[in-house]
Amino acid sequence: MKFQPVIGLEVHVQLKTNSKIFCGCSTAFGSSPNSQTCPVCLGLPGALPVLNKQVVEFAIKAGLSTNCSITPRSIFARKNYFYPDLPKGYQISQFEEPICQHGWLDIQVEGQDQKRIGITRIHMEEDAGKLVHGEIAGLEKGSGVDLNRACTPLLEVVSDPDLRTSDEAVAYLKQLHQIVTWLGISDGNMEEGSFRCDANVSVMPVGAAQFGTRAEIKNVNSFKFVKQAIEYEIQRQIDLIEDGGTVVQETRLFDPNSGTTRSMRGKEEAHDYRYFPDPDLVPLVIDPAWVERSRSELPELPEKKKQRFMESYSLPAYDADVLTATRALAEYYEECLALQTNPKAASNWIMGEVIRGLNDSGLPIEECPVTPRLLTDLLRLIEEGTISGKIAKKVFDEVWKSGKDPKTIVEEQGLVQVSDSSAIEAIIDDLLAREAGQVAEFRSGKDKLLGFFVGQVMKASKGKANPAVVNDLLLKKLKG
C-alpha cells in the first residue's frame, strides 16, 4: 500500500516589540531569570491586562502580507491548562474570532510547479515562561521557572493541511520567516525561540478521502530539524500501520541528536482547553481605516521585489532570489543602482565579494564596511578600464579594511591598469622568446595553451595589464 503524507504547520512568531503584550515589562532576551516580570505577567490576583497596540498593528501587517482578511471584531479567549511555566493557569489567546483568517502563500520547491498553501488563521497570544533544568548555578539537581518570557507577544500562524512533503514544509516556513523579518515585526531568531514550529503530521492511503490520525511535533526551531522530524514521523507512521498497529493522536518531541521523535503526551482537543472569552479584555474592534493605513505602509514584499528585479534589471532568477533574501540586502543593491552602476555587475559583486566578506566577518549587511557608494566607485573604475577585475578584488579587500575610497587606494598603491600596447607587447615578446617550445605546441593545434600565456603575462605585469589587450596581442603574435 502506498501512503500520502498530510502536513499542517503551526508557527509561533515572537513579535519585536519593546514591551509585552499585556503589560509594560521588557521583552529583551538574555536578562537574568525573573527580572522582567510584574503582577500582570506573574498572574497575581487583581492584576489586569492592557493590550499593547503595536501587537495589533504587527498582526494586521502580517495578515495583509499573507493575503488574509482582517476580522473587524476579534476577541481574546482564555486557554485553560496547567503547566508550571504558566502562572495564571491559562493562556490569553484567540479562538473563535482570530484577528486574521483565510490567507495563503505561494511556495516553490525546486523542480516542481508553484503551489498555493492556505493559511487558516493568524491569532495573537501571550507566550508562557520557560522551565530551566540545571542550566544555571544552584539548579544542578532540580528545575526552576523563568517567567521573563511570560506574556511576550506572539502571533500563531496556522496553515491548512495542504503540505505533502518535508520540502514543501521547509519552503513554506522559509517564506513565512522571510516575510515577518522583512516587515520588521520579528527578528526571526530561531535559536532564541523567536520563530518556532509545531508540525502536525499524518499519513493516509493514496486515493483515500479521509485524513489519517495526526501526531503533533512540538517546538522545532530550525529548518533542518523540521525536515528531519517530518520525514522521521512520516516513516514511523507508515511502518506502524504496515505492522498492523494504529497511529494514536498525541504530542511528540523531536530529538535532534538521534533524529527521532518520541511521545510526550496525549494530544488535546480544543474542548480540553475549555476556551471562553476573557472577561478582562473587551472585544477588539478594528476600524477599516486602520487596516488601509497599515496596507499603505507595507513595504514592497520579497516576491514582488524579486519579480521587479528580474523584469526591470534583466537579472536571472537566481540573482534576484539571492538579492531579496533579506530586505536590507535588497535595499543595499538598489542603493548601488541609484548611483548609476551596471545592474548585473553590481549583482555579481554583491553575491560574490560582499556576501563573502559578510560571512567571513560575521557582520550583517547593515554594517558592511564597503558602502553602496564605495562599491559603485570601485565598479566604475573597472568600467572605465582603470583597473582590471582581478586588481579590483584586491582593492575591494583594502576598502573593506581601511574604508578608503577605491580611487585613492589605486593611486597610492600604483594599481592603475596598463593598457599601453607597447608596454604589454614588450612583456609578450620576452615571454614568447623564453617559451619557444610552448609556442610551437600552440601553433601545432594546442589552443588551450593561450590561457597559460595570458596567465604568464598577467603575472609579469603584476595583474596590471589590460586582459583584453593581452589577449588581442597574444593571438596576433602566436598566429603570426
Image (spheres, helix red, strand yellow):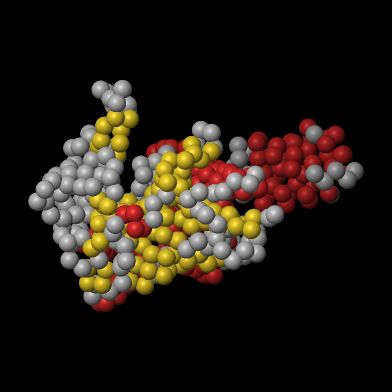
Task: Examine the image and state in which quarter residue 315 appears.
Answer: bottom right
Question: Horizontal and vertical percent for residue 161?
Answer: 50, 61
> Which is more toward the observer, 248 or 328?
248
Q: Is residue 73 above or below residue 186?
A: below
For the N terminus, the quadrant is bottom right
Give the left or right position of residue 177, taking residue 125 as reference.
right
Question: Horizontal and vertical percent for residue 45?
Answer: 11, 48
Give the left or right position of residue 324, taking residue 425 as reference.
left
Q: Residue furthest bottom?
A: 288
For image coordinates 84% across by 49% down, the residue present is 480
For image coordinates 47% across by 63% down, the residue present is 160
**Residue 299 in view of the camera:** no
> Which is more toward the observer, 275 or 380?
275
Task: Examine the image and state in which quarter residue 239 appears.
Answer: top right
Task: Examine the image and state in which quarter residue 221 appears.
Answer: top left
Q: Residue furthest left?
A: 46
For image coordinates 62% across by 48% down, the residue present is 241
Question: Horizontal and vertical percent for residue 44?
Answer: 13, 46
Give the left or right position of residue 131, taking residue 249 as reference.
left
Give the left or right position of residue 59, taking residue 342 as reference.
left
How many discs mark residues in the rendered view? 0
For image coordinates 44% across by 65% down, the residue present is 119
Question: Horizontal and vertical percent for residue 126?
Answer: 27, 52
